[in-house]
Image (cartoon, rainbow, N blue to C red):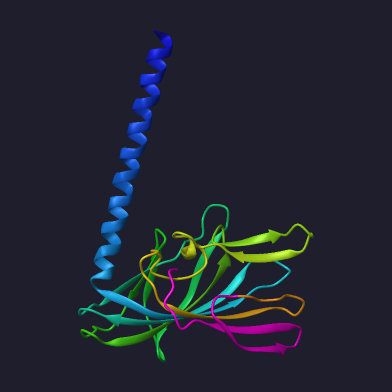
Amino acid sequence: MKNRFSFRLIHLLFVVFFFQLFISQKSIAQNFLKRFESIDVKNYVFHISVNDSSNEIIGKAIINIQFKKPLTTLQLDLKNINSDGNGMQVDEVSDGNIKLDFSHENDQLLLFIDSTKTEELRNYVIKYHGIPSDGLIIGENKFGERVFFGDNWPNRAQHWLPTVDHPSDKATLEFIVQAPSHYQVVANGLLIEESNYKETIISHWKTNIPLPT
């Protein structure tokens, strides 16, 4: 009798857990659906600088967006700094030479923009810095060497990259990575250019095929 009761309790907890998960995922999907009906990210350019003295990265994202309807706000996904001190802090947002007002709360970066037109294309620049708690994994490989490894699936890019972070939202992208000169940098796409600057290496990678975040 006791075993049967325990089984029923476990079954009930199992059902409640998946019901809550279903409701959560449905809410997230609806949120993204509203954005998909309003904007289409065409291309990302991510400038990322990493170092050996700390886990902090310095980032600049250039995001090319086509608007499907008039908007005065633009919502992107980017994790806030949490109680452990990890997360991203936005320093500046601009549209061309014009600095924009923004808010960064509850892991959402909201840009206050001039009213857009349907089918209009615009570029937005976001400068930020911080320590990723996920997405960009920082640690040692089996040889004891320090490595930075991007693992964004399915929606973990927002821990270190400002994006519309949903696997169905594909865009072309470029990575321009500055790292200490003893690193080797590999990214999606083709290597466009690689150069040395002081004691760092700068690698530029580019895709021609839209990819999930």
Could you tell me residue 25's position as x and y percent? 33, 50
Relative vertical location of residue 187 with respect to residue 140 in this rendering, above or below: below
Task: Compare residues 129 and 11 and report the one nearer the observer.
Answer: 11
In the current view of this chain or complex, which residue is farthest to the top?
1
Residue, x 61% and y 71% (percent of image)?
57
Could you tell me residue 13's position as x and y percent? 37, 29
> Which quadrant of the view contains residue 65?
bottom left
Q: Which residues are magenta?
A: 187-213
Could you tell me residue 83's position as x and y percent? 53, 52
- Is residue 5 shown left or right of residue 79? left
- Is residue 126 shown left or right of residue 146? left
Residue, x 29% and y 45% (percent of image)?
23
Residue 204 magenta: yes
Task: Compare residues 92 and 68 and report the one nearer the observer.
Answer: 68
Residue, x 77% and y 76% (percent of image)?
182
Could you tell me residue 142's position as x and y percent? 76, 57
Relative vertical location of residue 119 with respect to residue 141 in this rendering, above or below: below
> Which quadrant of the view contains residue 7?
top left
In the current view of this chain or complex, which residue is farthest to the right?
143
> Which quadrant of the view contains residue 76?
bottom left
Relative vertical location of residue 157 with respect to residue 16 in this rendering, above or below: below
Quadrant of the rendering where the N terminus is positioned: top left
Number of numbered labels in the structure image = 0
